[in-house]
Image (cartoon, rainbow, N blue to C red):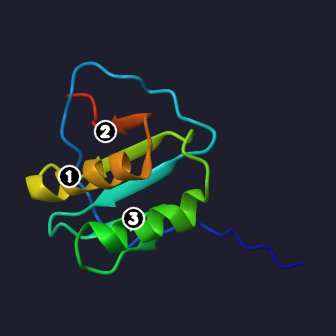
Amino acid sequence: MVSTTFTKETHLQVDLPEAASGDSAEAVREVEILIDTAGQYAVNGVPVPRGGVAPLKEVVVQVAGDDRELPLVITADRNSPHHAVVTAMDAAGQLGFERLRITTREPR
């Protein structure tokens, strides 16, 4: 008998900023934009080519399809460039997502 486990892996590493309050409940299905310290994006584990908001929007549409009711979560490293987070928020707004969350972690 052979057994294996498949894990969803992304190549972007993030160190989340801290926040004392927040909701720890997870959505059943969501779109997650991950941003690393270099400002590189991945959407639900799919790497996004560099080039600003247009390639980011393309990958978000590939992941979400036509469902703009899905929650969109931005998970950015604490040292991510501010403009990368703003670009992610802009892309979400342009695509019509209204349920937006930013991921943080509780202080130690």
Q: Earlier in the sequence, mark 1 or mark 3?
A: 3
Q: Which residue is mark 1?
A: 85
Vertical placement of residue 82 versus 8, above or below: above
Residue 13: x %, y % from top left: 28, 64
What is the x, y in percent for residue 94? 35, 51
Residue 101 in which image quadrant: top left
- Name the foreground residue: 68 vs 13: 68
Q: Are marks 1 and 3 in contact (CB under 8 Å)?
A: no
Which secondary structure lies at badge 1? helix
Q: Amino acid at mark 2?
A: Ile
| Residue 57 disc label | 3
Q: Which mark is residue 13?
A: none
Q: CA distance from mark 1 to mark 3?
A: 14 Å
Q: CA distance from mark 2 to mark 1?
A: 9 Å
Query: Can you see residue 80?
Result: no
Q: Residues within 10 Å of mark 1 (few under 14, many from 20)?
A: many
Query: Is the residue marked by circle 2 packed among few (<14), some (14-19), or many (20+) residues within 10 Å?
Result: some
Q: Who's the residue at 23% across and 63% down the image?
A: 36
| SS for dot 3 | helix
- The image's mark for residue 102 is 2
- Residue nearest the observer in this picture, 52 or 79: 52
